[in-house]
Amino acid sequence: MSEKARAQRVGELIRQEVAKLISNGIKDPRIGFVSVMGVKMSPDLHYANVYVSLYGDESQKKGSLVGLRRSAGWMRREVGKYLRMRYTPELRFFEDDSLEQVYRLEEVLEEIHEERRKAPLNHLTLSDIAEELTFGNSFLVTSHVSPDGDAVGSVLAMYHFLKALGKTEVYCYLSEPAPAVYQTLPGVEHIKQPGEEMPEHDTVVLLDISRVERTGSLETWVNRDWDQKNVILIDHHLDEHPEGKVGFIDSSYAATGEILADLFEAVAFPLTPEIAHCLYVAQITDTGGYRFSNTNARSHQIAATLHETGLDTAGICDHVFGSIPRRKFELLRRILHNTAFALNDSIAYVGVRQQDFIDIGATREDLNGIINHLLHIDGVRVAALFNELAETEVKVSFRADDSFNVADFCKAHGGGGHAAAAGLTVHSTLDAAMRDLLPALEQAMGDAS
């Protein structure tokens, strides 16, 4: 099936499901009589522009459109239950004035947009990146979904750096709140979640991420007016086609926070205790307290520099690693009890269902770090954790020792990450995801032996 034919098929499926939801499932009183006229898919199938005819006076039409847009997230999740796709397209609603003219205009704009988006990233030195930052006046600073310590710490370190440069308009956004363990980081109150209104900005700073889709609900904001703003990417993950205009990518760094430490040193920027705190958390979380194989001599040199600012490193480590909530302990106990093994006990794997969280009163955040317990079992080369997000959506996380590259395995199945830590999302049931991926993992590990 051609890409165009697939886009048309997906668009028609979405049109049918959205029409059903509008007729039967939405309780928003603002939504009046609406007809779904057509759906236009973006070339990468990440966006579905839904064109609707609205009835009533101007006020009623406006109310219906606002109601539809506010319900877009819920409808996307519902539609995702019926689409056999790795990524459920984001729904965007537009009033249908002249559908054919709109379609043609969109096609032209998408062709221009994709051509410019595919332009190769201009790789710069750290000093040049700092210069690019000085050119900006207003900034959107963000990172990936399911933010970890490196993501949160790097975003906040960049915030403090830009404010020290005299930038007054610095907006930090993540698709989800910073996990509780990072709520003590200096400046964490400045991290927001996206709402209806996007702050005006001329510069986007993408940290610990190489693809815009990994920003989750920020993706639309980042993509909007792409040609009219600078997009600066700083990351330590390798990607064949990193998305940005200028950037610095180096996988020899153990964390993006380490890159920022060298960035600040390159321009002789004096580290404040606030910035050092954020960078230290970024570093210790991505190196597992300097225990992971990505730790190198430079990691310890950067740690020494951060320590010299007067950080209470012992206190920070104790806060990040030293204690867990009772609900996380109960979740860990259940996971360890349900852990199974494969390939002569070299694979440890477990499935976590939505009901497990309900039973225990745990949150998704409580899963952070638990997979490492599986990898630490004697003889285990790869640990796999299957996390049921919805009835037909499963997030799969992998950790590995240096005998197997889980990033390559995940890439072959639509995901990505590091050689020792990677993941992917599967649009199927939890049982089906385990049934399909585990044999493939065994085969790949056998081939790599």
Image (cartoon, rainbow, N blue to C red):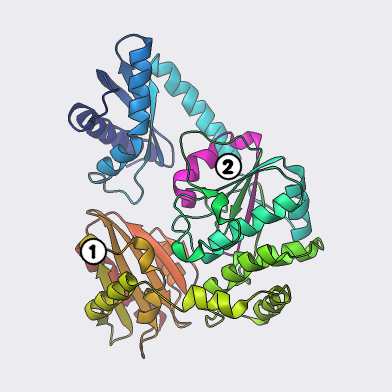
Amino acid carrying label 1: it is: Arg
Comparing labels 1 and 2, the label whose residue is closer to the camera: 1
Q: Position of residue 389 (x, y in %)?
A: 29, 57
Residue at screen point 38% across, 25% down: 66
Q: Are marks 1 and 2 in contact (CB under 8 Å)?
A: no
The secondary structure type at the circle numbered 2 is helix
Q: Residues within 10 Å of mark 2 (few under 14, many from 20)?
A: some
Amino acid carrying label 2: it is: Arg
Q: Position of residue 96 (x, y in %)?
A: 37, 18
Of the 4 image quadrants, the one containing the C terminus is bottom left
As drawn, 231 above or below 5 = below
Seen in the image, is 437 located left or right of residue 406?
left
As drawn, 292 above or below 218 = below
Q: Position of residue 416 (x, y in %)?
A: 45, 62
Residue at screen point 45% across, 62% down: 180
Seen in the image, is 165 located left or right of residue 211?
right
Q: Which mark is residue 239?
A: none
The secondary structure type at the circle numbered 1 is loop
Q: Earlier in the sequence, mark 1 or mark 2?
A: 2
Please provide the residue range marked out in magenta: 213-236
Q: Which residue is mark 1?
A: 353
198 or 375: which is nearer to us? 198
Q: Residues within 10 Å of mark 1 (few under 14, many from 20)?
A: some
Task: Look at the image and say whether residue 223 sits in the magenta stretch.
Answer: yes
Instruction: Report the number of discs.
Output: 2
Seen in the image, is 20 located left or right of residue 61?
left
Q: Which mark is residue 117?
A: 2
Q: CA distance from mark 1 to mark 2?
A: 38 Å
Residue with the most extreme left position? 24
Of the 4 image quadrants, the one containing the N terminus is top left
User: Can I make out residue 142 in this image?
Assistant: no
As drawn, 158 above or below 447 = above
